[in-house]
Image (spheres, coloured by chain):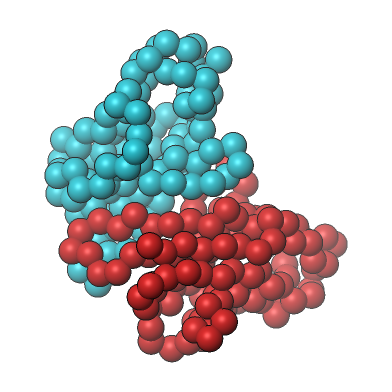
Chain colours: A red, B cyan
Amino acid sequence: AQSVTQLDSHVSVSEGTPVLLRCNYSSSYSPSLFWYVQHPNKGLQLLLKYTSAATLVKGINGFEAEFKKSETSFHLTKPSAHMSDAAEYFCVVSPPNSNSGYALNFGKGTSLLVTP
Amino acid sequence: DTAVSQTPKYLVTQMGNDKSIKCEQNLGHDTMYWYKQDSKKFLKIMFSYNNKELIINETVPNRFSPKSPDKAHLNLHINSLELGDSAVYFCASSQAGAGANVLTFGAGSRLTVL
């Protein structure tokens, strides 16, 4: 079985300061890991995806995440927060290869607040 | 053009009623999903169809019945609605092969049961 734990339910940063959203995973095999973002009253948008290629993954809107097997972590970072980054962020793990259909396992989400 | 579209966006109804939510994707994907997001924003898969065949059926009350008339459509019908069914329901789709675990989500349908 695989799961993810998002270590912070809420994170507050000032505009222009770095963002760190923490995620630890548990998996008995090499996982595929994702970060999705959900803006208020919107659907979920894929930020980035890790699939055992480069351990540092770059995503959209200046976000990146680093896969650290030794720490079972996949933290999301951004050098400088923008007001538009305020949203709910979900760390997600996928089961191994499937020919059809994936039951993604979502973390409980981290709400990012960006203050002026 | 919207890739994954759900209707209605908002649905308010009384306990005991029957309602449906429709989903359509124009991405040419083979697999479609229904996810439920509860009031604490936790997302959990309910169902998945691959090319009109049910392939994932999580522990969901049998009052919930998905139907896929073709691979571009996946509808969710809910009978005898209960207060606990209030949630946001997200439809999603993914392609076959490489990238099959990358889901494209719709904007969600917020169901409120009174």
Residue found at x 38% / y 46%: B45
Q: Quadrant of the C terminus of chain A?
A: bottom right
In this view, the residue farthest toward the bottom is A54
On screen, residue A89 versus residue B91, left or right, reads right
Task: Please tell me which residue lies in front, B45 or B95.
Answer: B45
Place of residue A71 in the rendered image (x, y in percent of width and height, measured from the top left): 57, 82
Residue found at x 44% / y 46%: B44
Place of residue B3 in the rendered image (x, y in percent of width and height, measured from the top left): 35, 51
Q: Quadrant of the N terminus of chain A?
A: bottom left
Residue found at x 47% / y 26%: B85
Please tell me whether residue B43 is drawn above or below residue A9 in the rendered image.
above
On screen, residue B64 versus residue A64, left or right, reads left
The answer to whether residue B29 is seen in the rendering is no
Task: Please tell me which residue lies in front, A97 or A3.
Answer: A3
Residue found at x 22% / y 64%: A98
Please tell me whether residue B9 is drawn above or below residue B97 in the rendered image.
above
Quarter location, residue A77:
bottom right
Place of residue B93 in the rendered image (x, y in percent of width and height, measured from the top left): 31, 52
Quarter location, residue A75:
bottom right
On screen, residue B91 versus residue B67, left or right, reads right
The answer to whether residue B80 is seen in the rendering is yes
Place of residue A31 in the rendered image (x, y in percent of width and height, measured from the top left): 39, 73
Task: Please tell me which residue lies in front, A100 or A44.
Answer: A100
Please tell me whether residue B3 is drawn above or below residue B34 in the rendered image.
below
How many tags in the picture? 0
Please tell me whether residue A47 is drawn above or below residue B51 in the rendered image.
below
